[in-house]
Image: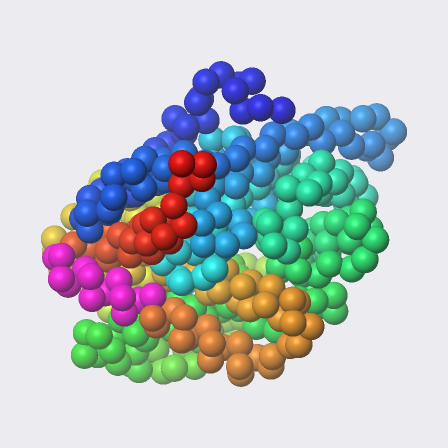
Amino acid sequence: MSADAFGPDYHLQHPLFKNALQLIEESGSLVNVDKNVLERLKRPKRCLVVSVPVRMDDYSVKVFTGYRVQYNSTLGPYKGGVRYHQDVSLGEVVGLSALMMLKNSVLGLPYGGGKGGITVDPTKLSRTEKQNMTRRYTSELGTSIGPQIDIPAPDVGTDAQTMAWMMDTYSQERGYTCPGVVTGKPIEIGGTVGRTGATGLGVVYIAERTYQRLGKTMTGSTIAIQGFGNVGAHAAQYAYERGAKIVAVSDVTGGIFNGDGLHIPQLQQWLKDHKTIAGFPNSQKITNEELLLLSVDSLFPCALDGVINEKNVDQVKAKIIIEGANGPLTNEASQVLHKKGVVIVPDVIANGGGVVVSYFEWVQDIMSYFWDEEEINKRLSSILYKAFDTSFALAKEKNVDMRKAAIACAVQRLEKAMLLRGLYPR
């Protein structure tokens, strides 16, 4: 089904995609990127829209809409997650695929940008229904995905089990096992050690590097972390192990605060026992909004997008912000804080640990040779440090915030590759 069936370019008006375009244009201008390259980067290469009919448990058939957007493959196969959510739309997936292109580029990975999804509330599906939907979606994508073509991964509403079903479906239809078609799989079928905590560990690696560049140390510094899910909880654990004082964390129920620092191992056990951080001993209850405004050395927003915006930006007191979530600061808020001297490490670098370790998984699947976790973490830190250092240097040189510098580095790498490869046909 052609995207034009939905009206000419309607999906290109989605706010997420328009924001990505703004970043590309502003950052491209910063480093004088070739105008023809910028023109090519304004559109996705391919948008797939597929019908996904599913036999439900009551024997009725429901038809869901699935998407896979392949934005740019100049640097390598398309790479990006698959999300199951009731608000998934073609416009959203186009925007997310553009951002994946930029993230993969700035991190120096041999990938283009891709993204996929199905418009569905996965919480309303049984395990059988979710499996049937996943397998049919994979089959509908057909030869558009593959280890050297497009490599999906988990995202919102999907997990390692979803990737196992995708891998199995793709493998069954080709007649042999193809572990490299997806990443984020269970270890038993070609997944990698270190993947679960990779994004949170990456946040801490980047925080450490930021402290170093500012002549400071993480040991003894105060940190507030919004979000205590997979990213926030692992970031808290790794920062705690490095001697940082985690004074506040939060989840969907709200936040907790202790000025002397929270005992993170005990908090993780409390969460396991009570399914929430609320009521943790020796802590004071605060709201998620109050957490963002605490007077701390560093703030790790690891939950929702847009939580720091024009309404609260003037009250933010942290000197360093590491974006563990996707887009927790609006562009306008970033500009305001940059002028105040706040160092903000953008999501395309700060939460890149997940896609970097996904890259390692793909490489290991292709080689059929696997590394231990120590090797994974060593390689992870090396890639993240390089991306940070390059962007930090450009930000200082051009006197701009790190978001604009990071996107500029991404666009520069794409420009060099696109000019070297040329345009086919001429």
Q: Residue at x 46, y 80 (%)?
A: 378
Q: In the figure, 4 relative to 196: above or below?
A: above
Q: Residue at x 74, y 69 (%)?
A: 188
Which image quadrant: the N terminus?
top right
Q: Can the viewer see residue 19?
A: no
Q: Is residue 204 left or right of residue 88?
A: left
Magenta residues span 387-399
Q: In the figure, 394 relative to 310: above or below?
A: below
Q: Residue at x 21, y 79 (%)?
A: 216
Q: Is 395 in front, or is 327?
A: 395
Instruction: Count every numbered label the image shows and give the total.
Output: 0
Q: Is residue 359 left or right of residue 188?
A: left
Q: Is 4 in front, or is 384?
A: 4
Dividing the picture into quadrants, the one containing residue 56 is top right
Query: What predominant SS class does the magenta segment belong to?
Result: helix
Q: Is residue 80 left or right of residue 401?
A: right
Q: Is residue 390 magenta?
A: yes
Q: Position of residue 319 (x, y in %)?
A: 20, 64
Q: In the figure, 126 relative to 64: above or below?
A: below
Q: Position of residue 175 (x, y in %)?
A: 83, 53
Q: In the figure, 226 relative to 30: above or below?
A: below
Q: Residue at x 12, y 53 (%)?
A: 339
